Image (spheres, rainbow, N blue to C red):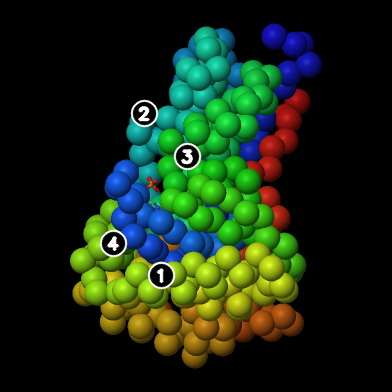
Amino acid sequence: MSPGLPRRVVVEARAKLNLGLAVGPRRPDGFHELATVFQSISLCDTLLAERRSRGFTLRVRHEDAAVRGRLSRSARARVPAGPGNLALVAARRFAQQAGLAGGARFTLIKRIPVRAGLGGGSADAAAALAAMAALHGVRPAPAARGALEAGLGSDVPFAALGGTVLGLGRGERLHPLAPLGACRALVAVPSWRVSTARAFGKIDRSKYGLTAWSTKLRFAQRLAHGRLTASLAMRLGNRFETVLGDRRSDFDSLCERLREAGVGEPRMTGSGSAVFGLLAPRVPAGKVIDRFVGNEALYVVRFTRSGVRLRRLP
Ligand code: C5P
């Protein structure tokens, strides 16, 4: 091992929004074809990692990043601190694939609300892979790295790449798009959650022709050419908004209250339950937040050009 390797690193693991998300047919492997525009945002978890000669440990700390409202205690309790945590799973698989004996001690500072469609678990996994690569001086070949990421979750390849990206296939075929510049958004996170697997099941059972999917897919592919704006990407819609069942009225109410507060057309991210809307340039976020009526946790975020950012620590 080279003596120049860092012993400790800190990684910012950024959340994502799906500016638009179309869902196609279920494939023989059980996953669905997707066409989505991913966008990295400034809301992030922080992963501190220290090299160990063997074994892994993880400590999770919660930090509240909401500008208004708070996540419930039960929402925080959903973050596994044990072997099921995606950061640990990712680090272990990385070590196994690279034939490493070591090892890291992780502290995860969790700010991204869990199971809200913000990609927090995937971001943590991508951060753990970046940390392991840096601490142990291992650079897997692109194909092996891609397979490892996709094996951890459909959003992990994007979380590792970051920026503004068109995702096709099950979300792992990535086509970077032109960066969207200085956009801000307000993200509202309700206390209710959605099971992604069940939401995909509802799409399978709903009546929605394959013609509609082909139209959406073509629209998404065209976004790679021509001038892209966030509003244009959001015109792709989000298929999960149409299968909310009992939660439809909660979602409609949240969108209405966001509009009244002054954000642009609200949209769900991933399979929910978080909803976001663009903040117009020059409108102070504080004004919009003050006008918002509701108990949802609110986050003000910027669009960013990368998904993970790693720094060496002394
Ligand atoms: O890959 P990931 O762990 O994010 O998948 C979570 C759930 O969403 C799984 O049940 C998977 O079957 C479903 N899924 C899907 N099609 C995709 C991505 C996820 O059916 N493209």
- Tell me the quadrant of the picture where the N terminus can be found: top right
Tell me, yes or no, if residue 299 can be seen here.
no
Say which element carries label 4: helix
- The three-letter code of the residue at mark 2 reads Pro
Kindly report the distance in space between the C-alpha atoms of the residues bearing marks 2 and 1.
38 Å
Q: Report if the CB atoms under discs 4 and 2 are less than 8 Å apart.
A: no
Q: Given this view, does label 3 or label 4 mark the residue nearer the observer?
A: 3
Kindly report the distance in space between the C-alpha atoms of the residues bearing marks 1 and 3.
23 Å
Give the image location of residue 314, x and y in percent: 75, 25
Would you place residue 223 above or below residue 170 in this image?
A: below
In the picture, the disc for residue 83 is 2
| Crowd band around label 1 with a 10 angstrom C-alpha radius: few (<14), some (14–19), many (20+) | some
Kindly report the distance in space between the C-alpha atoms of the residues bearing marks 4 and 2.
26 Å
- The three-letter code of the residue at mark 4 reads Ala
Which tag, 3 or 4, sits closer to the chain's start? Answer: 3
Which tag, 2 or 3, sits closer to the chain's start? Answer: 2
Kindly report the distance in space between the C-alpha atoms of the residues bearing marks 2 and 3.
19 Å
- The three-letter code of the residue at mark 1 reads Trp
Is 205 on the left-hand or right-hand side of 175? Answer: left
Say which element carries label 1: helix
Foreground: 200 or 131?
Answer: 200
In the picture, the disc for residue 199 is 4
Would you place residue 150 above or below residue 52 in this image?
A: below
The residue at which mark 1 appears reads as 213
